Amino acid sequence: MKGILFLAWRYVCFHKTKTLILIACIFLTAILPIAIRVLLSRFENSLVQRADATPAMIGAKGSSLDLTLHGLYFDRPPTQTLPYAEVKRIRATGLADPVPVYSAFQAASFPIVGTSLNYFDQRHLRIQTGQSLTTLGDCVVGIEVANSLQLKPGDSLLSDRENILDIAGKYPLKMNVAGILQTTGTPDDKAVFVDLKTAWVIDGYGHGHQELQNETDEAKVISRDNNQVVASAAVLPYTEITEQNIDSFHFHGSDDDFPVSAILAFTDSEKDNTILEGQYGGSDSDLQFVRPSLVVRELISVMFRIKRFFDANATLIGVSTLLLLILVMLLSAKLRTSEMETLFKIGCGRGTVIWLQAAELMIVVAVAGCLIATAAWAVNFYADDLLRWWI
């Protein structure tokens, strides 16, 4: 047997091109479905885990999937909002800890999430460096935002302008980076968190003005008399909130009417969740009650129905690869007729020749299997990093 293995090994080493092609065919055929299965399983776990951590969600009536993806992943900016008064209403019932989310803007293409400090407690977010939100205009960034933009506490981050061609639109806000969050492996790593009032300032509900009584820049003052100063178009609302101008920032109207895009309702029991659903689940309500875990599981079921087509495709490719291997072995046997005759002449039986060809195939399969096992381990080990990069 050792002699057969030695001859088979020498043969596959001599025909390197043929051997490498066969190994590549087996490896590529097997590793793709394995990698997809591992990544989908890990993706499913991350989806379910984040959804299960949010018992309920309330938002404007519309697509429950859009609301869930927005509230959990800050995806798809809301087309409709609900008033902040609903947050106060839920808090007054004592049924849940309502955490508002208002994510309608971006900073360097990362979502800006206006929320309350309760969000950090409910999501178990911890500050790695710096401090939490303390004043208007502060922001706390996820670790991936900090690494991507090379931010550290004390730096500034400018919100994106909604439309660069709209010079009369809302002005970007220059935010102070107060702190950087620890790694969580969730969408929170890719978000910029601000206080809800800061998000409203970005949206134009709150603003400040320059004090012009002592202004000496003639470009900013058209005329001046004893009681009145007429400003020019060069005087714009502040785009940065500092210790010197924070007192000038104010909001027009009641915060009850200011928008939030979703309310995360953290209830203590299923009973509270059911009562809350009864208050917001009516067909005549302008709002909708969503259980994120049910929505996510429904989404996963659709994904796995689609996955059946990929499994069928992988099976067909596997069969095609097997047929290719058989064809290669048959053609190889034809080409090696003289070699086989030589083996017969030196005393090798027909069984020995068959075992020799089987050993060659086993060596190819064994090498491909080792590569597949190594690649599968790597995919499983780096699955979270791959998902964060992919998604």
Image (spheres, rainbow, N blue to C red):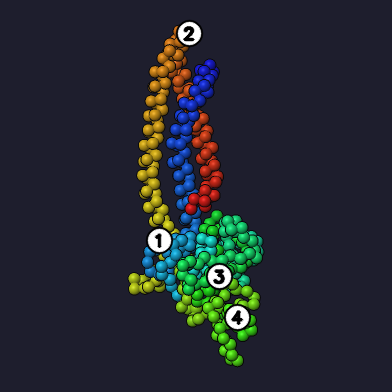
The image quarter containing residue 182 is bottom right
Is label 2 in a helix, a strand or a loop? loop
Badge 2: residue crowd in 10 Å (few <14, some 14–19, many ≥20) = few
Residue 38 seen anywhere in this rendered image of the structure:
yes
Pointer 2 residue:
346
Q: Image height check: is 108 above or below 312?
A: below
Front residue of this view, candidates 210 and 14: 210
Pointer 4 residue:
218
Pointer 3 residue:
173
Position of residue 246 in the picture relative to residue 110 (left or right): right
Q: Which comes sooner in the sequence, label 3 or label 4?
A: 3
Q: Which comes sooner in the sequence, label 1 or label 4?
A: 1
Pointer 1 residue:
65
Position of residue 224 in the picture relative to residue 90 (left or right): right
Q: Position of residue 257 (x, y in %)?
A: 46, 78
Position of residue 147 in the picture relative to residue 318 (left or right): right
Is label 4 in a helix, a strand or a loop? helix
Badge 3: residue crowd in 10 Å (few <14, some 14–19, many ≥20) = many
Q: Which comes sooner in the sequence, label 3 or label 2?
A: 3
Q: Using the numbered discs, state the Cα–Cα distance from disc 2 to disc 1 in whole angstroms.
A: 73 Å
Q: Position of residue 314 (x, y in %)?
A: 39, 39
Front residue of this view, candidates 286 and 160: 160
Q: Position of residue 135 (x, y in %)?
A: 61, 73
